[in-house]
Amino acid sequence: MTRFRARGDAGQVFPIYILVVGGLLFLAFAYFAVGQAAANRNGAQTAADAAALAAAQEARDQLADLWTLDVRDPAKWQGIFDGNGADDTCWRALELAAMNDAGNVDCDPDGLLGYRVTVQANKPIGASVVPGTADRRAHGSATAVIEPLCTFDPPGEDAEEDVLPKLTCGDGDGEREWELDPDDLGDLPRPEDLFDVHLAD
C-alpha cells in the first residue's frame, strides 16, 4: 500500500516538473529574443552615429579647405565659419551606413552646420518565441553638428590689405592664437583646429 502511494505521488509531481522546465525554457528563449533585439538596435544606432558623423566631418573638411583658399580674404571668413559653401555630404552617410551593415538611409542637412541621419539594419531580428519579430528590422537615428572653434576681429574699412586678423581657436586650456602672415602661410590651422564635430545631445 505504501509503495502504491509513493508511485502515485511521483506521478503527480512529474507533470509539474515538466511544466516548470517548459516555463524556464520559454523564459530563456524570451530573454534571448530580447537580447537579440537589443543587439540589433545597438547596431543600428552605431550605424546612424557613424553615418551622421561622417557626413558632418566631410562638410567640416570642405569648410576648412574653403577657409584655406580664402585665408588672404578675411571678409569671407565669417561666412565660412557659419557653414556657407560646403556641398551636400550625405553620400558619406550612405558609405558609413553600408560599412555598418545598415541601409534605407535618410540623411538631411540640419541647418548649415549639422546632419540628421536615420538608418535601418539590413538584417532582421529573426525568428524567436516573441511573435512578429522574424522580419522586423531595427532603426537608429542621430544628429551630428559642426561647431566653429575660432574667433577673430573682422577687419575694418581702413584695415591694411597685407595684414590678417589674429585667429583664436579652441576653448579652455586648448586655446591657441594664430598670427597669420599673408606672405608665409606654411603653418595654418588644421580642420580639427577650426571646427569640432560631435553628436548632438
Image (cartoon, helix red, strand yellow):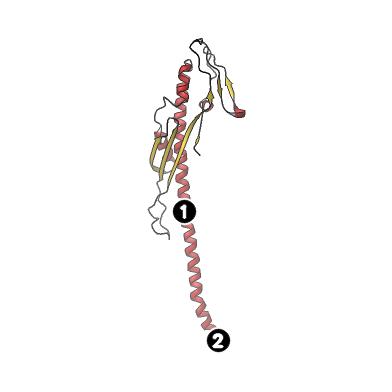
* Residue 35 against residue 151 in the figure, above or below: below
SS label for mark 1: helix
Farthest residue to the front: give it: 157
**Residue 78, position as x, y percentages in the image:** 47, 22
Q: Which mark is residue 89?
A: none
**Residue 15, position as x, y percentages in the image:** 48, 75
Residue 110 or residue 47, whichever sits in front: 110
SS label for mark 2: helix
Dot 2 corresponds to which residue?
3
**Numbered label tally:** 2
Dot 1 corresponds to which residue?
36
* Residue 77 against residue 98 in the figure, above or below: above
**Residue 84, position as x, y percentages in the image:** 42, 25
Where the N terminus falls, by quadrant?
bottom right
Which residue appears at 45% of the width and 52% of the height? 37
Q: In this view, does 98 lie to the left or right of 178?
A: left
- Amino acid type for the residue under numbered disc 2: Arg
Q: Is residue 91 left or right of residue 1?
A: left
Q: Quadrant of residue 172?
A: top right
Which residue appears at 48% of the width and 71% of the height? 19
Q: Is residue 143 left or right of residue 135?
A: right
* Residue 15 against residue 73 in the figure, above or below: below
Marks 1 and 2 in Cβ contact (< 8 Å):
no
Q: How far apart are marks 1 and 2 (CA)?
A: 49 Å
- The first of marks 1 and 2 along the sequence is 2
Mark 1 surroundings within 10 Å by alpha-carbon count, few (fewer than 14), some (14 through 19), many (20 or more):
some
Which residue appears at 48% of the width and 50% of the height? 39
**Residue 2, position as x, y percentages in the image:** 56, 88
- Amino acid type for the residue under numbered disc 1: Gln
